[in-house]
Image (tube, helix red, strand yellow):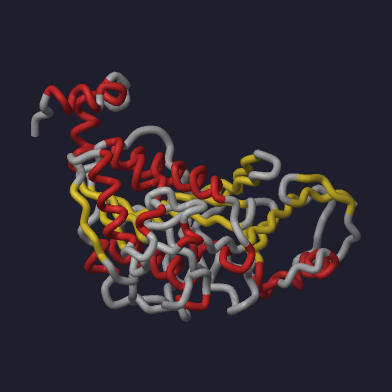
Amino acid sequence: MQVKINGKSEEVQGGTVLDLLKTKKIEPQMVAVEVNDKMLERDHLATTPLNEGDQVEFLFYMGGGR
Amino acid sequence: MDFTEEQINRYSRHILLPEVGGKGQKKIAKAKILLVGAGGLGSPAALYLAAAGVGTIGLIDSDVVDLTNLQRQILHHTADVGRPKVVSGKEKIQALNPDVNVSMYEERLTAGNALKIISDYDVVIDGVDNFPAKFLINDACFFANKPLVHGGILRFDGRVTTIIPKKSACYRCVFKTPPPQGLVASCQEAGVIGVLAGIIGTIQATEALKLILGIGHPLTNRMLDFDARKTQFREIKIKRNPHCALCGDHPTITELFDDGDPYAGCAVRP
């Protein structure tokens, strides 16, 4: 199914948001995840299913400044 | 406060703007803006805010200028290597605009000194290079009720967001705690394209001036991410999180604390 990840349409397998993170090899502790403009609690990643047309935002930590 | 003829000339391109005018320029002249970090992000912010005629600029930094800083930290010149950044910064700011008062804090922001320092300012700009400090600034601005312009840069990516405590999403609403040590690369480990500091730092300065002038729409409840490889900006909507440990409905953070070891980030150990 199609979901939008960081603004770009992608074909993904179903499953949960955590499954998507695993497919993309993203460590859950490294990212804040928003689905359809709603911030997901980290312990809800495994219980939130992905649906056709969902808009997923991965917000990575960006710590630099110097 | 009245401007001299020279000042009216100096700030004429501001005064011409209906959104600024003489009245707005006076607000800028009375404004006090704190830059936490006189490095990559702090450099362009300091120079543009100085040029704009900000009355008082506070500089906090405990470091001395290192040769590796000069690729992006334009507040410091080759001859400044080895000198305290706050001293070098103050000189450049006042050379550009002697109207500006500069307060120097040659120290690190800590849970012990943060509220005292921040409470003297109208707006705070985050130009630090490590997560414990970014969380500390977020928390301190919440407790001191001061608007914060957050910024971050890494490799070719940058991010800006403005936080009005209790009114818009804070850093902890999105990122609850600093990432586990070693999981996220630092600038020192991963590199950063120098001009990115200029792009993100000047957006931070723009936000600070808008807050001082009370014009336009602040970058609140939005994270503006910039990808220098594609020259693309992307805006991510964020919201206040009712579960936020700091500004949510049932806060568990009720006083300032140092959330982790600030030396674990990008900074060179002294």
Where does residue B113 sit, x and y in percent of width and height?
A: 26, 73
> Splitting the image into 4 quarters, where does residue B105 fall?
bottom left
A43 lies above or below B68: below
Identify the residue at image location x=44%, y=64%: B66
Identify the residue at image location x=45%, y=76%: B262
Identify the residue at image location x=57%, y=67%: B188
Where does residue B211 sit, x and y in percent of width and height?
A: 34, 42
User: Do we see residue B10 in this rendering?
Assistant: yes
Quick check: A25 left or right of B223?
right
Quick check: B30 left or right of B241?
left
Which residue occupies the extreme left position in the image? B1
Front residue of B25/B175: it is B25
B134 lies above or below B5: below
Q: How many marks?
A: 0
B26 lies above or below B120: above
Front residue of A40/A58: it is A58
Quarter of the image containing the C terminus of chain B? bottom left
Front residue of B46/A18: it is B46
Identify the residue at image location x=69%, y=51%: A36
Quarter of the image containing the N terminus of chain B? top left
Where does residue B244 sit, x and y in percent of width and height?
A: 49, 68
Where does residue B40 sit, x and y in percent of width and height?
A: 46, 54
User: Do we see residue B148 in this rendering?
Assistant: no
